[in-house]
Image (cartoon, helix red, strand yellow):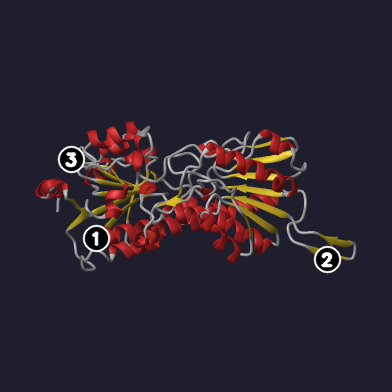
Amino acid sequence: MSPQGASRRCRHRCNVGTLEALTRLEVDLTRVLVPRERRAGEHRVAATPETVKRLIGRGCSFWVESGAGLAAGFADADYRAAGATLLDPSAADAALCWREADVVLCVQGATLADGDPGLTRLRPGALLIGLLEPHGNTALQELLQRQRLSALALELLPRISRAQTMDVLSSQANVAGYKAVLLAAAALDRYVPMLMTAAGTIQPARALILGAGVAGLQALATARRLGAVVVVSDVRPAAKEQVESLGGRFLEPPSLEQSPAEVGGYAQQASEAFLTAQRQQLADQLALADMVICTAQVPGRQAPRLIDDAMLAGMRPGAVVVDLAVAQGGNCEGSRPGETVERHGVRLIGADALPSSVPHHASALYARNLAALLEHLLGGRPAGAGGALSLDLEDPIVSGCLFSHAEGAVAGVSVALQPVGGVA
């Protein structure tokens, strides 16, 4: 079929399913485009040869920009062998491929709105899926609506049992928690495990983990594997069982009349009175800690400040703090995104992009999450069949992460009220 014919077919299918009472949106899933990531320092890729082959078996076809997976260890030849067509971004026909794409899979989707034509090259009705930094990002939402593009922001995906295989925040938080402990151990001025030598016994390092979410639990498991003694603090009393099952000691939260719990799998915002009581409780633990992993975040809000300057001054010189919440303001005073600084002899590591530092496995997990989401959208369509991809706006998975609507509205979904996960 000629490009002109394909374009007419895409427009026809997009117009036929014109959202009766805004309950269903029909998007033709003929071409899936996987671009190279534009953000500096981003080494992940949104599809791997494994997931390309898997989705081709469901009736999808793929364009993958050449070099898209190289930083993550996936060669162009591997994508070609999986059945994808490689696309040279500088070639004359690249713009045509963008115009003909029905779905774009990406990691840092918000970056596609900057610099090169990017999202403006997509046809109306196309679907963008990725991390879109949706909270407060009205400029991106307006651009998507102006271009009449649909978009699913993966940060807004609801944490329900049916969506577990699609949860990119959890899969990437796992990577972040693991790598954070390795960074702390490498920067520490002492051994992590207990060692018994001819020169005497070395006591194990003490680790303090703030936040018992996905990243915190993975940090706990990793620190225990290295031989550390681990204490975990979390605002949710219900986290105690998980912490103790992994060999950690749970630090009971302060007893106040109203302690924060969780909604939809995410921690709720704690009151300032609760945070003050928690900081006082943490001060004694920080004085004993050799390494501290900060993972506490609140959906769509500034990260709670748990460690202030006075508390840092009470820590022993040579201790290490890894702040995974630094991009949201940080749990530790003085931490800076992407930098390592010293304060009162304590080394502060602002770890804001750890999943990208483990790009091969982070990409493999992320791509499987996206493949599961696409397969969910495909529904009961038989393997190998073509046709339209249906976005059911009454499906809590779709409505929960719908950031932009092809018809220019978000179908009553309020982004400000949707939970966004962090590494916690």
Is 405 positioned to the left or the right of 265 in the image? left
Q: Which mark is residue 196?
A: 2
Sequence-first tag of 3 and 2: 2
Report the residue that reaches farthest toward the front.
Answer: 257
- Distance between the Cα atoms at labels 1 and 3? 21 Å
Q: Amino acid at mark 2?
A: Met
Q: Residue at x 75, y 37 (%)?
A: 345
Q: Which residue does the numbered mark 3 point to in the structure image?
A: 407
What label does residue 369 carry, if any? none
Q: Is residue 404 visible?
A: yes
C-alpha distance separating marks 3 and 2:
68 Å
Residue 317 occupies quadrant: top right
Q: Residue at x 83, y 65 (%)?
A: 196
Give the secondary structure at mark 2: strand
Q: Which comes before the other along the chain, label 2 or label 1?
A: 2
Disc number for residue 378:
1
The label nearer to you, 2 versus 1, is 2
Instruction: Choose top left, top right, bottom left or bottom right for residue 309.
Output: top right
Expressed as whole percent of the image width and height from the top left, the position of residue 222 reads 62, 60
User: Dot 1, crowdedness within 10 Å: few (<14), some or many (≥20)?
Assistant: many
**Identity of the residue drawn at 18% across and 40% down:** 407
Q: Quadrant of the N terminus?
A: bottom left
The residue carrying pointer 2 sits among few (fewer than 14), some (14 to 19) or many (20 or more) residues within 10 Å by Cα, namely few
